Image (tube, grey):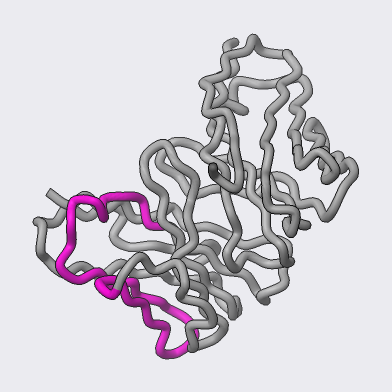
Amino acid sequence: GAGVSQTPSNKVTEKGKYVELRCDPISGHTALYWYRQSLGQGPEFLIYFQGTGAADDSGLPNDRFFAVRPEGSVSTLKIQRTERGDSAMYLCASSRRTVDTEAFFGQGTRLTVV
Amino acid sequence: QKEVEQDPGPLSVPEGAIVSLNCTYSNSAFQYFMWYRQYSRKGPELLMYTYSSGNKEDGRFTAQVDKSSKYISLFIRDSQPSDSATYLCAMSPWGGYQKVTFGTGTKLQVIP
């Protein structure tokens, strides 16, 4: 596809359930970023991948959150034992290289925990 | 205190007006400054990317950075209804997008 694709676009889950959010970056982009945006707030950094490895996961709020990118392309953000406070827009972005001046964001996955 | 402060608005202006959007920051390590536009229920879209102090112009948009005052601005000339969106400032100590710090966003409405 032409842009960063995120699925699903919306996800409603019950408290305590496990969810997976998928990000399909622009083809050839080696750097991939996950951000979380709560209502009325700016995006907050979660984790950054360079290739297959997580180069910086310091933004993950706790050990319920985990992300993988096994083949250096598609990435999955995994949230265990979801809590109502996890409700937010989860944004994925990619850039060709880490130092690129532009990263392209997907449309996000809106997660609602009820 | 947040590292990046941005007035959330909303800011409402008539079509054709000049719009001024601003952010202040506290981290003197920030060297790369960005402005993003975000339409409702969409991902952010990069408008301007600047390094260090100075001005940068792109069409109707001008970005200004004053590192001595820790203050950045985005000016929109001849504003259009299609400019109605939330505008996010963002900044980083490094080039690239690892650990970029965003402002909370200013919601702008341009009235025809």
Quadrant assignment, res A21: bottom left
User: Above or below — where is A45 with respect to A31?
Assistant: above
> Which of these two is toward me, A1 or A12?
A12
The number of discs equals 0
Stretch of the chain drawn in magenta: A63-90
Residue lying at 45% horizontally and 67% vertically, measured from the top left: A59
Residue lying at 47% horizontally and 72% vertically, measured from the top left: A58
Image x and y of residue A65, in percent: 30, 71
Quadrant assignment, res A78: bottom left
- Is residue A69 within the magenta segment? yes
User: Above or below — where is A113 with respect to A4?
Assistant: above
Residue lying at 82% horizontally and 42% vertically, measured from the top left: B65
User: Above or below — where is B50 with respect to A92?
Assistant: above
Image x and y of residue A77, in percent: 33, 71
Q: Is residue A78 visible?
A: yes
Image x and y of residue B35, in percent: 67, 44
> Which of these two is toward me, A49 or B65?
B65
Residue lying at 53% horizontally and 73% vertically, measured from the top left: A32
Q: Is residue B58 visible?
A: no
Image x and y of residue A7, in percent: 32, 63
> Which of these two is toward me, B84 or B36?
B36
The residue positioned farthest toward the right in the image shown:
B54
The residue positioned farthest toward the front in the image shown:
B1
- Is residue B10 within the magenta segment? no
